[in-house]
Image (tube, helix red, strand yellow):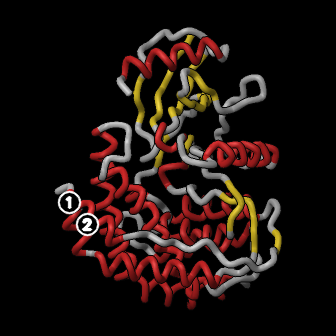
Amino acid sequence: MKDNVIDKRIADLMIKCGFGTLICPIEPVSGGFMHRMYKVKTDSGIYAVKHLNPEVMRREGVHDNYERAEKIESLLEKQDIPIVPALAVHGKKMQNIDESYFYIFRWQDGHITGWNHISKEKSTTVGNILGRIHAIAPRNIPHEEPELSNIPWQKYVQRAEDEKNEIASVLSDNLQLLINAEKELNTARASLPDILCISNGDMDPKNVMWDKGNPWVIDLECLDYGNPISHALQLALQWSGITTCNMDIEKMTAFFDGYLAAYDNGFRAYSSVFGVAYTWVEWLEYSIQRSLGTCIDEAEQSLGISEVRNTIRRISYIQSMETEIRKALDSRLPDMKSR
């Protein structure tokens, strides 16, 4: 969508929602890899406006997912979890104008901690926030067979080769790595204990802002009910450097320190379900699809190609660190129970 079109829609949106008239040009700001974020100044204040990806919004069931996330967001507000919630207008958080969907937020001052500048203290703090979320309403559930990943790797390789897309070679060269990673992911999912809780599996470093040392969790569209073991392990790894292929075991330990202080269900066999770390294969599939043209413009396709390369490198790094991380999970977590 061209900038002048989206600018006009945002300007109309702010007036329609009662948030005032623009007094400055709309500024694109860095955000996640899926949606686009803008800084908007009106005569009533400063706002962050998120334009939800049109391709995502056309998926089956996506509006139900967002509605569920909004209800959970309201629960977190009541529990004083430090979040930046979307603003509601006439009881609705998601706004629609000309079939474009938006969320509007009060502008939150602060900064995102760079992936390579995460401290053990911040890892502990975020682990504690996740623990507080998981502690709101956890429950044991009857056993159900998990939804397993089933990605047609060979078909993607063939399509990329047929289209002479630049991701063809990196997919072909790493085909066995990806098949093995997906197999480990599915094995781990089938081994997870039968527990369900409120969770935020997207609470990685780019989605936590720090203002004068205080954390504020942003980008809450992924709030849902999920398995606390899976989400705790994945986020502990992200806050300890797995995303940038620079793992620090001490930061992983610090994350679990904070987490277990807020929520401890007694589970310690995290090494036995380490395969959930390979959830990255599902992000890889989404990036492959964007690389092959399932996107809104060339900029998003280019981002998809970049993420294919980055994610495969990350999966390869996780495999190289697997033995060391499993050993640390086995040797370090039991000691935390008595802390």
Q: Secondary structure at mark 2?
A: helix
> Is residue 338 positioned above or below 171 on the image?
below
Asked whether disc 2 touches disc 1, contact meaning CB atoms under 8 Å apart, the reply is yes
The residue that appears at 56% across and 25% down in the rendered structure is 47
For the residue pair 102 and 256, the one nearer the viewer reads as 102
The image quadrant where one finds the C terminus is bottom right
For the residue pair 125 and 287, the one nearer the viewer reads as 287
Query: Is there any visible trace of residue 215 in the rendered image?
Result: no
For the residue pair 12 and 118, the one nearer the viewer reads as 12
The image quadrant where one finds the N terminus is top left
> Is residue 272 positioned above or below 97 on the image?
below
Q: Which residue is mark 2?
A: 158
Mark 1 nearby-residue class (10 Å; few <14, some 14–19, many ≥20): few
How far across and how far down the image is residue 226, in percent? 68, 65
Rendering quarter of residue 198 = bottom right
How far across and how far down the image is residue 115, in percent? 41, 57
> Is residue 160 positioned above or below 6 on the image?
below
- The type of residue carrying mark 1 is Asp
Side of 270 relative to 193 (left or right): left
Rendering quarter of residue 86 = top right
How far across and how far down the image is residue 112, in percent? 47, 46
Q: Which residue is mark 1?
A: 162
The residue that appears at 37% across and 17% down in the rendered structure is 4
Query: Is there any visible trace of residue 319 in the rendered image?
Result: yes
> Is residue 272 positioned above or below 244 on the image?
below
Side of 89 relative to 294 (left or right): right
Q: Secondary structure at mark 1?
A: helix
The CA span between labels 2 and 1 is 6 Å
Rendering quarter of residue 14 = top right
